[in-house]
Image: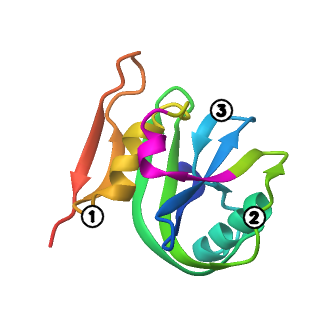
Amino acid sequence: MENVKLMNMCRIVDSSTNKVLVQERVKSWQGIAFPGGKIEIGESIVTSIRREVYEETGLKLNTVKICGVKDWYDKREKKRELVILFTSDDYSGEIIPETSEGKVYWMSEAELKTAKLADDFDKLLEVFKNEEINEMVYEDNESKDEKIRWDLKLY
């Protein structure tokens, strides 16, 4: 049986301003990224992203859409880590400007290009933005030159 750690992340878009909600993470995986976190044991995947987004931002997601995954296998730990990626532009509530996870605010996609992003988040954005890509996979996590592969959707 494989040891698997399940996580989630959501790209929330304000369709009126065309900005995305970011979190300036201060705990693990520091830097700017989208909100998300761990999927609890026994918790459904969609429930988990709604819970994480609410806890970290104050927003309630009305609808979400799975847009891809980030996947890697840690050979040393003998553990797979899988992040299920979502997108939504259907939410309610007011954002909480800061939680223990970090500051939360809206940012344009152009501003993301020059922001201090979390490690490899610039590459993960390809999965969120490109509808032809459905997975970001680390090919080799034992070297410092981890190779990233994007798997294209098959129709």
* Helix, strand or loop at mark 2: loop
Q: Is residue 3 magenta?
A: no
Q: Position of residue 23 (x, y in %)?
A: 66, 48
Image point (42%, 20%), residue name: 142
Residue 151: tell me if it is visible.
yes
Q: Amino acid at mark 1?
A: Glu
Q: Position of residue 64 (x, y in %)?
A: 52, 77
- Residue highlighted by disc 2: 95
Dot 3 or dot 2, earlier in sequence: 3
Residue 41: tell me if it is visible.
no
Magenta residues (range): 105-114
* Helix, strand or loop at mark 1: loop
Dot 1 or dot 3, earlier in sequence: 3
- Residue highlighted by disc 1: 131
Residue in the foreground of this view, choosing between 121 and 13 = 13
- Residue highlighted by disc 3: 30
Q: Are marks 3 and 2 in contact (CB under 8 Å)?
A: no
Q: Amino acid at mark 3?
A: Gln
Image point (66%, 61%), residue name: 39
**Residue 55 appears left or right of 110:** right
Q: CA distance from mark 2 to mark 1?
A: 27 Å
